[in-house]
Structures are given as structure tokens and as C-alpha cells.
Amino acid sequence: MAAVLSPFCIFTPENAQDVAGGLEILVQTNSHFAVRSGGHTPIPGASGTSDGVLVASNKLRNIELSTFAGRQVVKVGPGFRWIEVYEWLANQGLTTVGGRYATVGIGGFSTGGGLSYYRSVSGWAADNILNYELVTAQGNTLQVNDNSNSNLFWALKGGSGNFGFITSFDFAVFPLISIFGGNLLTNASGTDALIKACASYADPIHGGVTDPLSAVNPTIQLALDTRQWSSFTNVFYNASVGSIPATVREFHKRSNERGFHRDRTSIFRGVCKRNCCVLERYVAVRWRMWHRRLFRATSIKMTSQAVELAQQVFENESAKLKNVTDG
């Protein structure tokens, strides 16, 4: 199954006026169309079409610092990927609440809510958007915020692309600081130890999940051609620290066990300090956009038992999948 579809044609607007003109034609002709920002989601049809027009945001790449409602913001178009925004802001000594993977686009991530390493402190990415520039199906360009078109402002925070074409986002920014973090990789023999580390982190009383400065993003995967398990885990602590934070110490300790190794680009070297955009760049090599894949999401109560049960179900169900020998 592949997420790559072949549209009849591709429309690449460069500003809100182009978007308004294009949408007017599409609406008048009752044409099917899809909108793509970064195209990160691998589900067919999520950001593409095979029977209509693809409206691609590639050229909507305005970015500048500004102010809105008395707060400093970065005004950014949907044509960027998060690593580009992070690096641009880092040059200004700033950052914002954005994607955890470098290659994720601005548009779909932000309109879908947007999970971030800063979520326990600053909320979802959508919580940090103060204003949208949006083009309606009628071709009108609106400024959408808490005081203007407030109902639409509420709907856009998780409403995806169902209410208009967003040509610009105003994200609140804050000072960039050093963080503690890095990437841990395991082969098959390290999977059980990783599960134990995750279960320890999930403990509702003593685990790291209670620390709003910490974030852990573990991924365990099965290669169907080799039937081999492996994993990569991003560990993030949103503070400049002089020692290993207690809430992520279990992951650092496990990194010395059999089956674990540190990414050659890892920043686990004693106590390591980097900003978020550096961690993002390292994570990018682990998420290869050309692999065929499918994912779904669900939510469970965060307990050690739930973590272990989820992995158990994953292993049992994965054993039923057919071998794939052509990648």
C-alpha cells in the first residue's frame, strides 16, 4: 500500500490571492481537490488525490517575526517543514511549539492539533497559534483569531483542513534554551529492556510522566522481511541541567545494556545540552518518508501495565502478518 497518488494536475499558489483565485475555479467547476503541506501522513488520500487537483503549499513560504495581541509571534506559511522553522528561529534565539519530526509540514500538523516536546508545559501546537490567515471557499481572505471570527478560530484548533485554506499561521515564540536529550536505538535483544524503561516512566507516582519538563517518544517496529524487532526512542528534557534528570534516568541507564546502542548522531554523551532543532535533525534520519507504512492512533491510560500490554498485543498481532520480501 502506498500513499503516493497521482493527481490530474498540481496547483502551487504563492500567496493568498492565488489561493482565492484557485479555490474560486475549483468551487465553480465542482472539482475534487486535496491540499498538501508536508505530506507526512502516509494514509492514502490524507494529503493527496488521484481523481482531482492537488493544491500544494510548497511556495507559501513567508516567514517573519511580528507581534500579535501584545505577544511576539513568528508568522509562517504552510510551505515549510518544522526543521526549517526551528533553525530560522534558532538564529533569532527563539523557538516555538511545533513538530517532533523534522520533515513534518506546518499545515496539517498545526490544524490537527499538533503534539510537541513542549506539550506538558505549553499545550498543543494549536494552543499556541494566535492568528490564522485563511481563504474561504468563497474566495474571501480572513484574519481569524480570538477577537475576529472567533467561532472559526475555535474550530481550526483541531479541525484540520475542513474550514478553509490557511495561508499563514502566527505562532507564539519564546526564548531558546539548552535541553537534555538524545536518541536511543535497540536491536531485538534490547526491546524488553526498553519496554521496562517505558513502563517505569509511565508509573503514575514515581515515573517521569509526572514531570512536565520530560517527554519520551518510543517507537518499536518489526521489519516484515527479516522478522526482526528494533526500536528508536527520543528522550527530551526541557531544561538546562547539570546532571541526568531523575525522570529520564532509566533510559540513560538502559543505554548501556546489551541490545542498546546510541545513534552515531546521538547527543547522549554524559550530560548533553542541545536545543530542540538539533534533536529534530537527528530524529529525521529515523523517519524515512519513502517507506510504505500505515499508522493509526489511540489513547490509553498511562500505566506500566498498559505499556506492557500494548507491546504484548503488538507482538501477538504482528506474528499474524505475512512476510514482505520486496521492502
Image (cartoon, grey):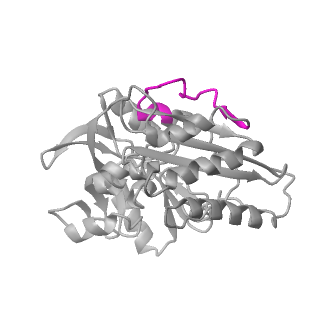
Judge whether 64 appears above or below 267 on screen: below
- The number of callouts visible is 0
Q: Which image quadrant is residue 313 in? A: bottom right
Q: Residue furthest left?
A: 70
Residue span colored magenta: 259-279
Judge whether 325 appears above or below 82 on screen: below
Q: Which quarter of the rendered picture does the N terminus lie within?
A: bottom right
Q: Residue 242 or 215: which is nearer the viewer?
A: 242
Q: Residue furthest front?
A: 206
Q: Residue 275 or 69: which is nearer the viewer?
A: 275
167 sits left or right of 185 in the view: left
x, y (%) of residue 250? Answer: 55, 41
x, y (%) of residue 8? Answer: 60, 62
x, y (%) of residue 238? Answer: 38, 38
Q: Residue 231 or 156: which is nearer the viewer?
A: 231
Res 171 visible? yes
- Does the magenta segment cover residue 274? yes
Q: Residue at x 59, y 47 (%)?
A: 197
x, y (%) of residue 168? Answer: 32, 51
Q: Residue at x 56, y 67 (%)?
A: 52
Q: Residue 257 or 108: which is nearer the viewer?
A: 257
Q: Main secondary structure of the magenta part?
A: loop
